[in-house]
Amino acid sequence: MLHEHEVRQMVEKVLAELLQSQSQGQDAGASCCGGGCECSTTIEDGFIDDITVQDLKEQFFVPDPVDREGYLRMKQYTPARLGVWRAGPRYNTLSSLRFRADHASAQDAVFSDVSEEFVKAHQFVEGITKCANKDEYITRPDLGRILSPETVERFKKELKAGAKVQIMVGDGLSSAAIEANIPDVIPAILQGLRKHGIETGPIPFVKYCRVGAMDHVGEITGADVVCCLIGERPGLVTAESMSAYIAYKPTINMPEARRTVVSNIHKGGTPPAEAGAHIADLLKTILDKKVSGIDLKL
């Protein structure tokens, strides 16, 4: 067993050697670049491949699997991270980097805004809730359900009163979902409604929007049915998932059970054009039966 003074001597010796090696390294660096020697830095032309391009259903790292084809068939039924393998007790490098990249995409979707150019290009009637900024939107969901006084006045003037169907768009928790899906889903909904002989008016866009904001829009317009297209909270599979919340004659503070939901609208789930056609038929059914949510029996 080592005595205390022996341990102290060993520590002092190690520290002295460490300080000496650091000092020699600094002297070598100074003599290299300060004395006219020819130091060169190689800069390579190229780029780092985007690791998020590959479909998770096709990504497979298990070495020497017993049934590779069976494993890959199983992966086709779910976007879950199966077959990521490991390096010792941790994930391998590519699996870990892909996880961090997908997490970064989800954060970007939450904290970025739908571009003003996108809103203007679709001729939406712009509005905002009582949230002053994104931080308040995240921490105060109650304020995201109520429109600002200025927005209330604008919607009263510019939206169609007493419409059978009022479509609205809200950024929700994913601006990426809105920009990815709205260009396809709204034309499909409008085409389906025209087929049923149902006309709609101008479409509002609500910034910092929670689902409950559709209730406020319903009370302002007096529409029979309100359909809110809103970006959903992103996950690690996709940051572009959108949902359609539909309610018959919605009112502020109504029970959540009165809403009918079409979710998972994105290119890896229900394609937006297909979802739009389904939503149009669902709107017609709700109008005919005059109920929505759990009271709607399909």
Image (spheres, grey):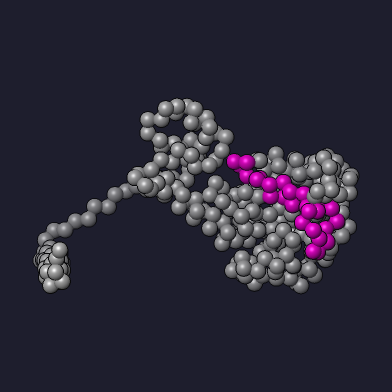
Where, quadrant-wise, is the N terminus in this rendering? bottom left
Where, quadrant-wise, is the C terminus in this rendering? top right
Q: Find the residue positioned furthest to the front.
A: 1
| Closer-to-camera residue (26/67) | 67
Q: Quadrant of residue 4?
A: bottom left
> Can residue 109 be seen?
yes
Left or right of 283? Residue 74 is left
Query: Does the magenta portion include 255?
Result: yes
Query: Does the magenta portion include 11?
Result: no
Residue under the point 62% across and 58% down: 173
Residue under the point 42% across and 45% down: 95
Left or right of 184? Residue 156 is right
| Closer-to-camera residue (10/76) | 10
Left or right of 291? Residue 232 is left
Q: Position of residue 44 (x, y in %)?
A: 29, 49
Residue under the point 41% across and 49% down: 97
Residue 137 drawn above or below residue 243? below
> Can residue 167 be seen?
no
Q: Quadrant of residue 26?
A: bottom left
Q: Position of residue 204 (x, y in %)?
A: 74, 59
| Closer-to-camera residue (47/86) | 86
Residue under the point 65% across and 54% down: 231
Task: Please state the extent of the stretch shown in magenta in the rendering.
Answer: 243-269
Q: Position of residue 115 (x, y in %)?
A: 61, 59
Left or right of 3? Residue 72 is right
| Closer-to-camera residue (4/182) | 4
